[in-house]
Image: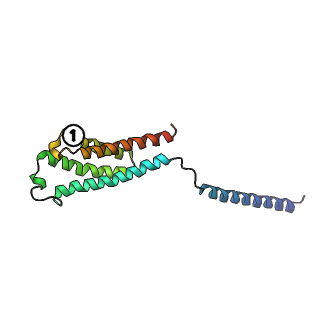
Amino acid sequence: MSDTSARDTLRDQARDNARDRDNAMSVAAISSERIEPDDNGWTRRLVLFLRVMAIVSIIKGLYHWAQVTGFIGGEEEAFENQSMAWQTATIYFAVIELVAAVGLWLATPWGAVVWLTTVVSMAVIELMFPGIYGGSLTVVAFEAVMLAAYLALAWMAARERPP
């Protein structure tokens, strides 16, 4: 075999290998775009729930800030006319609800912890100190349902991930 024919054979083999590699890469690109089965369904539901709770927390935080700044309520309901306990609780929730909203939207562990703190704090204030916000059992029930929903979704999301 001559040097020219050997070089031509090697060049043809290199070209064939490059073509095979390009075809393999294009097949890999197509296969990576396939929709895979929904293995993380509970995790997706948990993140959606956290985002909804983030929106609720933003609304609650802005409501408390509206109370502090006087955008809502009349003159007799003004912030400075309220008890010190009411003012303290309102400032606390005005700040912590917005912090929780950021953490919940990002689906971070600290966001869930801060949100759980707000849920438990509101339930405790409503049940143990009814003189501050009036002791509404509706608020406590809502907070309990949201807490139960979070715990159930977190449990199911944790079960679908291998240890």
Identity of the residue drawn at 63% across and 58% down: 30
Looking at the image, is 134 positioned above or below residue 72? above
Judging depth in this view, the residue of 5 and 126 nearest the camera is 126
Q: Position of residue 140 (x, y in %)?
A: 26, 43
Looking at the image, is 116 positioned above or below residue 36? above
Q: What is the quadrant of residue 29 in the picture?
A: bottom right
**Other-residue count near label 1 (Cα within 10 Å), few / some / many at <14 / 14–19 / ≥20:** some
Q: What is the quadrant of residue 125 in the picture?
A: top left
Judging depth in this view, the residue of 29 and 61 nearest the camera is 61
Under circle 1, the secondary element is: helix
- Which residue is tagged 1? 127
Q: Position of residue 58 (x, y in %)?
A: 30, 55
Q: Left or right: where does residue 32 sit relative to residue 150? A: right
In this rendering, does residue 105 appear at all?
Answer: no
Q: Position of residue 161 (x, y in %)?
A: 50, 41
Q: Which residue is outermost to the front?
A: 138
Q: Which residue is outermost to the right?
A: 1
